[in-house]
């Protein structure tokens, strides 16, 4: 696989110890159950980043230094392939944390978030997860495994990390029951709440950790914005909605990591790849502000 780094047309790949951000390309695709293609997502985002301008409208996040790690590959060994991917992702995120950098994971399927969560857990970090997604991802098992994209936020929550879910609009009975059983550590503002303008002004719970990780499944967007996902669901948020919500997070919390996941590139259709790359840069800028 050719070596490419985020925004490398404008800036050389910064040394890992001198970069504020570590971009971690993670072409994981092991439990996708509808449309495929997420393994091609990280490369598409990196290639689209070459079309970005480095002024985000407020500042130049590239001045802080961006290092792109080598593409993550599943760890060697036995066991479920998803579990081996999670081990490899945890190591890559742990490397970023040791360097004092903010990890920016590019997926790949959503199961990758568990690797990040484990790395923060091992580092003893007290953080919360802000979760943008069409789906709740709170099932206990899905299609015979606990390490599925449909279960990943359940696994993260079980590690002791509180959650806030945004833009969800595909929730199973099991997931609704799990939410109801965990009201103190799991808040949800589904798409219908956002569409009705009923999101509270201060929607992050008062006792939510001061440090947060944003996990952004691109199907949180309406398919008109991002059609290139494996499971597009009508009724999602728009681009400006997403930026406003991210600004809300940055204004009251410290963003210590994030991921952008589930891009399944469509040949000849460039705007989803570009939008995903721009979202990555917008999250870098928000993390710098926070």
Image (cartoon, rainbow, N blue to C red):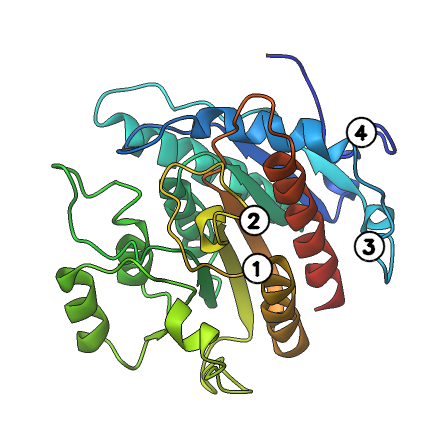
- From this view, report whether residue 25 is shown above or below residue 200: above
The residue carrying mark 1 is 238
Q: Nearer the viewer, mark 3 or mark 2?
A: 2
Which sits earlier in the primary sequence, circle 3 or circle 2? Answer: 3
Q: CA distance from mark 1 to mark 3?
A: 18 Å
Proximity of marks 3 and 2: CB atoms separated by less than 8 Å = no
Res 164 seen here: no
Q: Residues within 10 Å of mark 2 (few under 14, many from 20)?
A: some
- Residue at the spot of label 4: 8
- Tell me, yes or no, if residue 49 can be seen here: yes
Foreground of the two, 85 or 181: 181
Cα distance, mark 3 to mark 4?
16 Å
As drawn, the label of residue 225 is: 2
Mark 1 or mark 4: whose residue is earlier in sequence: 4
Q: Residue at x 54, y 46 (%)?
A: 260
The answer to whether residue 56 is above or below residue 28 is: below
Query: Relative to residue 275, is residue 266 drawn left or right?
Result: left
Disc 2 secondary structure class? loop
Q: Secondary structure at mark 3?
A: loop
Q: Residue at x 59, y 12 (%)?
A: 1
Quadrant hosting residue 188: bottom left
Q: Quadrant of the C terminus?
A: bottom right
| Crowdedness near tag 1: few (<14), some (14–19) or many (≥20) residues, C-alpha within 10 Å | some
The residue tagged with tag 1: helix, strand or loop?
A: loop
First-in-chain label (3 vs 4): 4
* Residue 42 against residue 285 in the figure, above or below: above
Name which quarter of the figure residue 185 lies in.
Answer: bottom left
Q: Return the residue at label 3.
A: 56
Q: Residue at x 76, y 43 (%)?
A: 19
Residue 225 sits above or below residue 78 on the image = below
């Amino acid at each position: 696989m050719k070596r490419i780094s985020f925004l490398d047309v404008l800036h050389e790949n910064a040394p890992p110890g001198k970069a504020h951000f570590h971009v971690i390309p993670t072409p994981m695709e092991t439990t996708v159950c509808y449309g495929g293609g997420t393994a091609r997502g990280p490369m598409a985002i990196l290639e689209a980043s070459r079309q970005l301008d480095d002024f985000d409208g407020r500042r130049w996040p590239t001045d802080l230094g961006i290092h792109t790690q080598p593409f993550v590959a599943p760890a060697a060994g036995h066991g479920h392939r998803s579990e081996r991917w999670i081990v490899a992702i945890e190591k890559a995120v742990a490397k970023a944390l040791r360097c004092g950098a903010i990890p920016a994971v590019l997926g790949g399927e959503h199961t990758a978030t568990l690797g990040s969560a484990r790395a923060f857990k091992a580092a003893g970090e007290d953080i919360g997860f802000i979760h943008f997604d069409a789906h709740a991802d709170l099932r206990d098992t899905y299609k015979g495994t606990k390490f599925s994209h449909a279960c990943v936020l359940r696994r993260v929550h079980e590690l002791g990390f509180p959650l806030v879910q945004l833009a969800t609009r595909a929730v199973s009975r099991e997931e609704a029951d799990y939410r109801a059983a965990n009201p103190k550590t799991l808040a949800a503002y589904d798409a219908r709440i956002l569409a009705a303008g009923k999101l509270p002004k201060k929607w992050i719970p008062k006792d939510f950790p001061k440090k947060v990780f944003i996990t952004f499944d691109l199907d949180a967007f309406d398919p008109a914005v991002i059609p290139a996902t494996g499971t597009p669901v009508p009724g999602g948020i728009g681009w400006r909605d997403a930026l406003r919500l991210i600004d809300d997070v940055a204004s009251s919390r410290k963003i210590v990591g994030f991921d952008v996941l589930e891009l399944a590139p469509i040949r000849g259709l460039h705007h989803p790849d570009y939008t995903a790359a721009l979202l990555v840069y917008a999250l870098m800028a928000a993390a710098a502000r926070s």
